[in-house]
Amino acid sequence: MAGTIEVLVPGGQANPGPPLGPELGPTPVDVQAVVSEINDQTAAFDGMEVPVTVEYDDDGSFSIEVGVPPTAELIKDEVGFETGSGEPQNDFVADMSVEQVKKVAEQKLSDLLAYDVKAAAKEVGGTCASLGVTIDGEDARTFDDRVDAGEYDDVLADEAAA
């Protein structure tokens, strides 16, 4: 009866209740041990929704794989706001520096389709646009064009290439 369970849990704050408890209850694993391990591994993402995969075997053994929180969660945490804008093209809720965009891009790089930090930053810029977050005081919808024009080459340069 080995299987896999995928859930989103608040970082460092998982508990035996939903969504974990009902999923793990019928399995042979020690639910409290799983919750404790998840909290240990997600403590760095305190309060953010974190994707977690729990694989278990018939003998009660389990392994946990912690993913990276969604890009929007990382942006909200980095800039410090609760919810995005209801009208992201007109009503802006926060402003990010290019350095902050780069930080989020580096955190998400392994989960994105991008090959380098510059491309990952453009993906983060797209999420900023949908949340109503400006980048360096400018509309995030123009961020791709500014990156392509080389405006941020000094900040977004890949350390491996430097």
Image (tube, grey):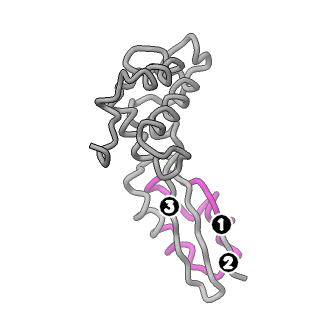
* Residue projecting furthest to the left: 162
**Residue linked to disc 1:** 5
- Asked if residue 95 lies in the magenta stretch, the reply is no
Q: Which residues are magenta?
A: 6-35
Label 2 Cα crowd, 10 Å radius (few <14 / some 14-19 / many 20+) = some
For label 2, the residue is 27
Q: Quadrant of the N terminus?
A: bottom right
Check residue 7 for magenta coloring: yes
| Drawn side of residue 57 relative to residue 159, left or right | right
Residue 30: percent from left, percent from top: 56, 78
Q: Which mark is residue 66?
A: 3
Residue 2: % across, % down: 68, 80
Which residue does the image show at 51% across and 44% down from the upper left?
Answer: 114
In the image, which is nearer the foreground, mark 3 or mark 2?
A: 3
Report how far apart the C-alphas of labels 1 and 2 lie in the structure.
10 Å
N-terminal of the pair, mark 3 or mark 2, is: 2
User: Which residue is at a point 65% across and 71% down the rendered structure image?
Assistant: 24
Residue 30's place in the image compared with 18, above or below, is: below
- The reply to whether callout 3 and callout 2 are in contact (CB within 8 Å) is no
Question: Dots 1 and 2: beta carbons under 8 Å?
Answer: yes
Graded by Cα atoms within 10 Å as few (under 14), some (14 to 19) or many (20 or more), the crowding at tag 1 reads: few
